Amino acid sequence: MNTKIKTYKIMVDSKPFANIRGSIPAEVAKKAASKILVNSLNRVRFSIQEKTGKIRHYDAKLENLVRPYHKNGKLVKYRIVVKKMGKQVGGTYPPDLGETSVDPIFTFFPRGEYEIKIIKRLGKYCVNIENCLLFYIEDNILYLEYIEKCQSSGTVNLNKIINYARLIKLESIKLADSSEILDGISMSIIFILATGISWYNQSGFISGEENFIEEKKHNLELMNLTLNNFLSKISNKNNNNIGKFIQLINKYGFNINSKVKDIFKKIKELLKNNLLNEDEIDILKKILFFIQLSSIISYNPELTKIL
């Protein structure tokens, strides 16, 4: 007689774990831990329902997941370790933010690595990580006021904010894009002229589906123009800074017949690697301001990411 074997599965609403099952909760936890290792996540908390209906909560922290297993003095394999938790993490958000509480934000921005101040007032939940980022939560929406490289890159920190907002089941993230690569050098303009979309667009932040489609179409046409044709679309092209900018791009192997996207991909690379001197940075600031003033680029900086 065949006996149906009950299986257990992850209870959290998370696509990466949707099909993870096992004959016992510990087996499911280990499979989930393996998946976390593959995806290089910092930490995931998940829940498994047992036969009795009881829900067990697990904490899988990357640095604690794997332990070396030795036999006769030789490394044989790695054990996957998960921590069973006594209570559910999360719950109705925002949680109590008293001194003794542990908010999920510390999963992504650990104490000791980030200086974080949590402020709860006027019905808002505000997080200020000094010199890194500032955001607040209101009506199930996270409003990102400021983000900067700190401990990790800006991209890594942005992804942490996105994952945090998903963990606490927020509706969306909203922001106003004023990003800069250096003081006075617009990141959005550099990225749009190099790739057709902004840095935030790459992470799924858009000003509305139809707007984004039209913006992208327009900007892709711009970036595929020659520099000469691009400049012809800008008013007051006799500006003295244009001549200096052409001298700058000549230095790095381009000319007025080069495509805009190729020029700005190179500029993005030079900025990333700190290869421009002060005079060149000053020229770049002035030409970007000139381009921004012309309104030739189509971009609405009021952006939303639906979670």
Image (cartoon, helix red, strand yellow):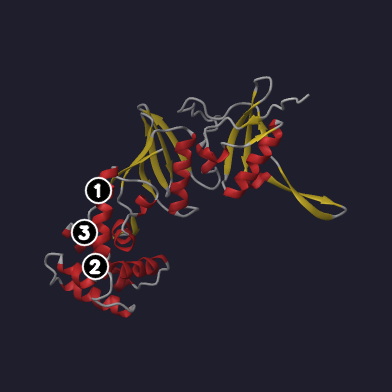
* Comparing labels 3 and 2, the label whose residue is closer to the camera: 2
Residue 183 drawn at (x, y percent): 32, 59
- Rendered view: 97 above or below 191: above
Q: Which of marks 3 and 1 is in front?
A: 1
Q: Which residue is under mark 1?
A: 300
Give the position of the N terminus as an image quadrant: top right
Relative to 71, is 247 above or below? below
Direction front: furthest residue: 1
Query: In this figure, which residue is indicated by the disc labeled 3?
Result: 292
- In three-dimensional space, the C-alpha distance between marks 3 and 2, rounded to whole angstroms, equals 17 Å
Q: In this view, does 135 lie to the left or right of 1?
A: left
Name the amino acid type tagged 2: Leu
Query: x, y (%) of residue 39?
Result: 57, 48
Instruction: Tell which circle, 3 or 2, labels the residue nearer the N-terminal end.
Output: 2
Q: In this view, does 61 lie above or below 155?
A: above
Q: For the C terminus, give its image quadrant.
A: top left
Report the amino acid beneath label 1. Answer: Asn
Question: Is 223 placed left or right of 94 in the picture?
Answer: left
Of residues 296 and 130, which is closer to you in this image?
296
Question: Which comes sooner in the sequence, label 2 or label 1?
Answer: 2
Give the number of the disc on residue 225. Answer: 2
Q: Is residue 171 left or right of residue 30?
A: left
